[in-house]
């Protein structure tokens, strides 16, 4: 049932966000209580129980959303319209950057784990896992806000209201950057406390490695907020090529190069620079791409 979750996010695009929130709440509550309190905590089913709980959560969300899809009066209904392979191809191409981001994340996590196991053994893998959890928390915040303004950007771009697109984009940047600065301060100055929550019974060695890594990786929060929003911005304009370029740079290209180069030059701890520097180099590239696009709009607006 997991495959039916993501199409419902479309409801936010068609101004049916209330239905999406109901779905998400049902999904989250069902998963939380079934997994943590019943299947795992009470029945002791472990991983199998966790997987079953997740499936039930998605099924519950589907049951909430399905009636809206089956009603003919709904703006988005499975009972009207015709299937178009051409439209499907356009949608797939335009959304390919988000798909590549997920694929890249899987590849980079594998590479990081391989390097950590090679350099520090199980301690290194545990350290990276903890830091990756923290980084993903911030990334999901940025993705949520960026995806939230995509419909506004797309609608106004299609209507030719370029000034509104600019205003919305800059508001998104201000919000994301503010959140990024807050997350940076929390992770940089509070790294020891945060890390200790993951390794309550861990030795000083794993705490030291993870604290150093957390402090260095915290700098990624200062830039990935803008990079994620920029990728969503280009997707909202239908510029899949540029969006893919941004996603591949921050999610794969500069990360793979960093994993290969930094530990060799700077020692084992050099691997922690991979993510912040990948975001930095992507940010430099993204600034150029944004300036180029906005400059073109300025000419068309004043023409």
Image (spheres, helix red, strand yellow):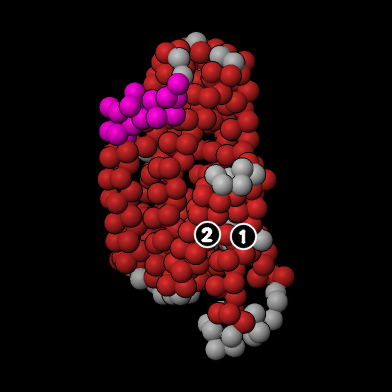
Residue that appears at 28% across and 40% down: 182
Who is closer to the viewer here, 160 or 10? 10
| 292 on left or right of 268 | left
Q: Is residue 1 visible?
A: yes
Q: Give yes or no for contact between labels 1 and 2 (Cβ–Cβ under 8 Å).
A: yes
Helix, strand, or loop for circle 2?
helix
Cα distance in 3D space between marks 1 and 2: 7 Å
**Residue farthest toward the front in the current orientation of the protein:** 42
User: Residue 189 magenta-drawn?
Assistant: yes
| Residue carrying label 2 | 30
Q: Main secondary structure of the magenta part?
A: helix
The residue shown at (38%, 45%) is 226
Of residues 284 and 60, the one nearer the viewer is 60
Pick the front one: 250 or 130: 130
| Percent of width and height locating residue 293 | 41, 54
Q: Residues within 10 Å of mark 2 (few under 14, many from 20)?
A: many
* Residue 261 seen by the camera: no
Q: Earlier in the sequence, mark 1 or mark 2?
A: 2
For disc 1, the marked residue is 56
Segment colored magenta = 184-201
Residue 142, how many percent across, how many down?
40, 49
- The disc placed on residue 254 is none
């Amino acid at each position: 049932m997991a495959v039916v979750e993501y199409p419902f996010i479309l409801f936010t695009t068609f101004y049916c966000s209330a239905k999406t929130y109901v779905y998400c709440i049902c999904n989250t509550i069902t998963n939380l209580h079934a997994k943590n309190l019943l299947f795992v905590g009470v029945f002791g089913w472990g991983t199998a129980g966790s997987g079953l709980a997740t499936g039930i959560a998605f099924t519950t969300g589907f049951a909430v959303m399905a009636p809206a899809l089956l009603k003919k009066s709904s703006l988005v209904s499975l009972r009207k319209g015709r299937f178009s392979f051409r439209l499907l191809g356009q949608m797939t191409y335009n959304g390919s950057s988000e798909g590549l981001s997920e694929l890249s994340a899987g590849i980079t996590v594998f590479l990081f784990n391989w390097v950590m196991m090679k350099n520090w053994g199980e301690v290194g893998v545990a350290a990276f896992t903890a830091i990756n959890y923290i980084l993903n928390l911030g990334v999901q915040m940025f993705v949520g806000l960026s995806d939230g303004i995509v419909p506004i950007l797309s609608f106004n771009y299609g209507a030719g209201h370029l000034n509104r697109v600019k205003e919305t984009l800059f508001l998104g940047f201000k919000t994301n950057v503010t959140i990024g600065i807050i997350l940076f301060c929390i992770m940089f100055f509070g790294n020891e406390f945060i890390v200790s929550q993951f390794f309550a019974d861990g030795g000083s060695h794993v705490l030291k490695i993870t604290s150093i890594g957390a402090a260095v990786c915290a700098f990624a929060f200062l830039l990935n907020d803008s990079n994620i929003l920029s990728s969503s911005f280009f997707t909202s304009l239908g510029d899949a090529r540029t969006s893919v370029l941004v996603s591949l740079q921050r999610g794969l290209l500069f990360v793979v190069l960093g994993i290969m180069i930094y530990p060799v030059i700077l020692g084992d701890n050099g691997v922690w620079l991979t993510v912040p520097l990948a975001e930095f180099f992507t940010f430099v590239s993204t600034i150029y791409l944004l300036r180029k696009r906005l400059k073109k709009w300025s000419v068309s607006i004043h023409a």
